[in-house]
Image: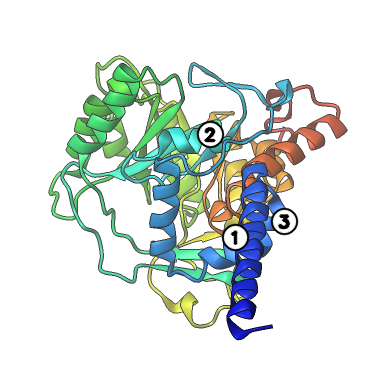
Amino acid sequence: MSRLSIQRKLKSFAVVVLGGVSTFSAINIYRGNDKFYQDFVMPLVHRLDPESAHELAIFASKYRLIPKSHYEDPDSLRINIFGKRLSNPIGLAAGFDKHAEAIVGLRDIGFGFVEVGSVTPFPQLGNDRPRVFRLSEDRAVINRYGFNSVGYDKVYERMEELRFKNNLNYTVGVNLGKNKTSDDPINDYVQGIYKFGPVSDYLVINVSSPNTPGLRKMQTKLKKPYLLLKLAPDLSYEEKKDIAEVVKMKSCRMDGLIVSNTTVDRPDYLKDHVNKREIGGLSGLPLKDTSTKMISDMYKLTNGITIIGVGGIFSGKDAYEKIKAGASAIQIYTGLIYEGPPIVARIKRELAELLKGDGYHNIAEAVGQDVR
């Protein structure tokens, strides 16, 4: 056999092998094969630096390159929250789709709702790179993005187009931020409420510490969107009590809480001794128990205010614990970074099984059961 003939056969063999591998990969991605993502797709994605991987995920979601989830949400997962009927209680936390670019693609993955932002009044670049760090052994992330944002106007244009031109019937929240140079953050938030009220289902304001005068100023005559506070997990019990007293006041029109944001704390048990030294907010598995305890505290202190629970959710069990602690819905972010789109269907499937196993017919029956 000639050398040329051998080369041709090897080339043909390589084409067949590559074609087979491509077909196999495409089928598994289309099916949302959880193990395939964990063993092959996500390790490849994690060869990129964290921010580049994030940008790739936004690109894929924006252009709907990620196949639509085939999981059919059971009736037991349906919830009523903030005037909307959702097919499931699993939302995407703010920080992933900062600029409202990928809402439809993220809906297709199977999220019951999506929160965009944080959005600042005027465009700003945020902090210099690198500003995101994986703590892979800890299933955690540290970020110090610094509220990078395209600004209110650009995000509003995208939201308006989805709502009124494309008639999007899907629950979307907007997380409001403030510019670094702002000398009146309270006014920034109020302007954000007016700006995004007509195009959002709920709005979120981040508070890292109690600010009773500030919260009292968050009153507008605008027809609702629902207004939520997102709390940091580093608050003392007294600070939690202060916030609870304010949100219970009739003059304070807060409709719910998101518990919790990232933490500046660094638990001693973190395994990544290099990246844990980075400045920024820690999210992911190390936050799980802290956020669940805070959900329980705020649920009791507010006499059962509506809470969206977030922090360290990687499984249906994690979500269920937060629901029984008082959360009416939950959000994920870091879990998506580590496990990819199949995590959404898996959490929903496991959550439905846990509800059934405990004799609950729906999410509402389980909310707050561990603290009542």
What whole-number distance in Å separates the C-alpha atoms at marks 2 and 1?
Answer: 19 Å
**Quadrant in which residue 87 is drawn:** top right
- What type is the residue that disc 3 sits on? Lys
| Location of mark 2 (residue) | 108
Location of residue 196 (image quadrant): top left
Under circle 3, the secondary element is: helix
Look at 42% across and 37% down and name the residue there: 115
**Above or below, 54 relative to 178:** below
Q: Is residue 266 left or right of residue 74?
A: left
Q: Amino acid at mark 1?
A: Val
Q: In the rendering, at what x and y percent does residue 352 appear?
A: 76, 33
The answer to whether residue 311 is left or right of residue 115 is right
- Left or right: residue 201 versus residue 13 is left
Q: Secondary structure at mark 2?
A: helix
- Viewed as shown, does residue 262 lie left or right of 13? left
Q: Height in image: 360 above or below 351?
A: above
- Lower position in the chain sequence, tag 2 or tag 1: 1
N-term mark: 1 or 3? 3
Question: What quarter of the picture does the N terminus occupy?
Answer: bottom right
Measured as percent of width and height from the top left, residue 290 is found at 59, 55
Q: For this rendering, which residue is in front, 243 or 26?
A: 26
Q: CA distance from mark 3 to mark 2?
A: 20 Å
The label number, if any, that marks residue 35 in the structure image: 3
Q: Which residue is mark 1?
A: 41
How many residues crowd mark 3 within 10 Å: few (<14), some (14–19), many (20+)? few
Looking at the rendered structure, the secondary structure element under dot 1 is helix
